[in-house]
Every structure is written in C-alpha cells, then in structure tokens.
Image (spheres, rainbow, N blue to C red):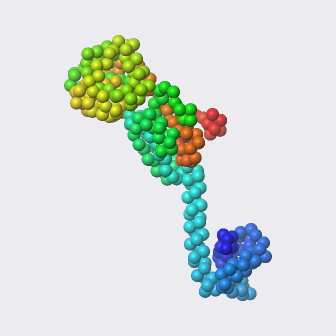
Amino acid sequence: MELRHLRYFAAVAENQSFRLAAERINVTQPAITRQIHDLEQMLGARLFDRTPQGVKLTVAGELFLREVRKSLSILESATRAVKLVASGLEGTLRLGAVENASWDGLVPDAFNNFQREAPGVSIHLAPMNTPEQIAEILNGTLDGGFIYTYGELPRALRVLPLAISDVVAAVPRSWGLPEDQPISARDLNGRPVVCFPRQTYPAYYDMLVSACSEAGLTLNVVQEVRTEAAILSLVSAGIGAAIVNAANLGRPPARAQFLGFTDLSVQMPLAFAYLESNPNAALQRLLRVLDAMLHPGASDAERDGR
C-alpha cells in the first residue's frame, strides 16, 4: 500500500465520485479507478458501493476513511514541521555568549529580533568566556557564540564582526572617587586590583597588561577570579579596583562605579562565531537577522551578495 492509494481513496470518498476526485487531484479517471480497485484487493474488502448517482462508502469504507484521515493529518503535520525546521522557523539553537555582551546593545536586540521572526525556535544560551565557546563550537556542542576576538582564531571558525567596545575602571564606591570623572591609568598605581587569571584568556590578558604598562600602570593584583561578574562582586566588596569591559555599563553594581580612562584604551571586538559547515537552518536565519541589523539599509539581494 502506498500513500497515493490513501489520497485517491480520500478524494473519491469526499467527492462521492470517481470523476470529480480525478479532477480534484489532477489524474485520469481510469488511473484513480484502478488504484481504488487495487486498494480494495489489498484490504480484502469493498470500500465503495457503486450507484447511478455516484459512489457511496460501505461500512468498511467509512471505518477506513476515519483512519485514513488520521494518517493523512499526521503526515501533513509532520510535513509542516519539517518545512518549518528546514526554513529555520522551528527547532533549537544552542548559543554561547560572553556574559557582559548580553546585558545591553546588539546581542539582546538580536535575540529580540530573532524571536519575533522565528518564535518557534528555542534558544539555549550558555554564558561562558571566549576560549570555552570556541572549543564548544568546534566540537559541535554550540551552534555559535558571541565572542571577543583576540589572537589567532582556528581556521575552521567563521566570524561575523559586530561591535567594538573599550575598557573602563570599576572602583568601589567606598573609595569616594568623584562621579563621572575620568581617571588616568596611573591613578590606580599602588591600589589593589582584582583581575582574571591569565589562563582564562591569555591573548586578552597579555594585551591588557601591555596596554597598562604603556600607560604607566603596574597592576597590583590582590585577587584573581574567572568571570567579570565575580570581579565586580569583589569590587563591590571593596577588595580592589578592576579594569573591565565597558559593556558592563548596562548593569552597574550598586556598590561600584565605572570611570572612563583618559589614557588607557583596550578595544574589545565583539563578533559572532560559528562553523560554516553547521547544517542548523535556525543558525542561518540568525545570521541573516544579524546581517540585517548591521546593514539596515541593504536589500536582501545586496546582503546575499556579501
């Protein structure tokens, strides 16, 4: 028994006519008559009574029609689901993000735009640093991630540049420094500093230390923790100052204040990283959303040509 047997049978039953059924599904009447005859032979039961006015379902035919409609409905539902997944409108997207990038700006806007366009896609977001994301993207655990790009990246990785931020000083409010008044990097000389261990992100750590040295600042590191959330907690506790991503301005801690630098700049290039070979259609849809945000005036053809 094949799918066409079920569709032909349903068409005849609903139209109560071989001729009308043939017209509806665009096949010849002899072909549909032959398929119904073969179906009755396979089932060992007569499905229709032939009358001068057309055809009428037998008791066996009425029972079979109920079951056929269930089967066709399941098939149509499965077909719709597959099409939605294939177009990136349903499914799952596993993403990573450096936590400070997700508080404000392009990243949360991208999630908002994507969910409006593809509400059937479930986003699984994991906060993690850049090296952790890169490792998981390469091994297939993540579909993509919002990372900061320092040093040489793996050749298999594709990167879409998104934005560039800078660093600011985070200092305890208990220090009583003037509000909104930029400081010199040298102003932190001799003061305790909270930082992250070099092994967390060697490329960025070396760049930060080098920039501080050039600005005349020698970091007096009193404690090291892996995340900026933990760093800001220690700053809030008065343990020391820190040099953090300006993206943290979107979530200022109550007991810490952010101050700009007059003479220290470490650019933080935010990008979306992924593998071109990733077959997830939802990932391709997210990439189109990001590209539309980066180039709002471009047409679809112009974006496709990039």
Direction from residue 187 to residue 209 in the image, left or right: right
| Front residue of this view, candidates 200 and 282 | 200
| Total labels drawn | 0
Quadrant in which the C terminus appears: top right
Q: For the N terminus, which image quadrant?
A: bottom right
The relative height of residue 286 versus residue 53 in the rendered view (above or below) is above
Observer-nearest of 23 and 186: 186
Query: Residue at position x 48%, y 43% from top?
Result: 142
Tell me where residue 239 sits by quadrant: top left
How far across and how far down the image is residue 284, in percent? 56, 43
Residue sitting at 76 percent across and 70 percent down? 27
Residue located at (32% from left, 34% from top) = 229
Query: Does the rendering let one see residue 39?
Result: yes
Q: Is residue 184 visible?
A: no
In the rendered structure, the answer to whether residue 264 lies left or right of residue 301 reads left
Q: Is residue 166 left or right of residue 162?
A: left
Q: Residue at x 33, y 15 (%)?
A: 217
Q: Quadrant of residue 214?
A: top left
Q: Quadrant of residue 234?
A: top left
Whole-percent x and y of residue 53? 72, 85
Q: Position of residue 158 (x, y in %)?
A: 55, 35
Compared to 8, does 137 lie above or below? above
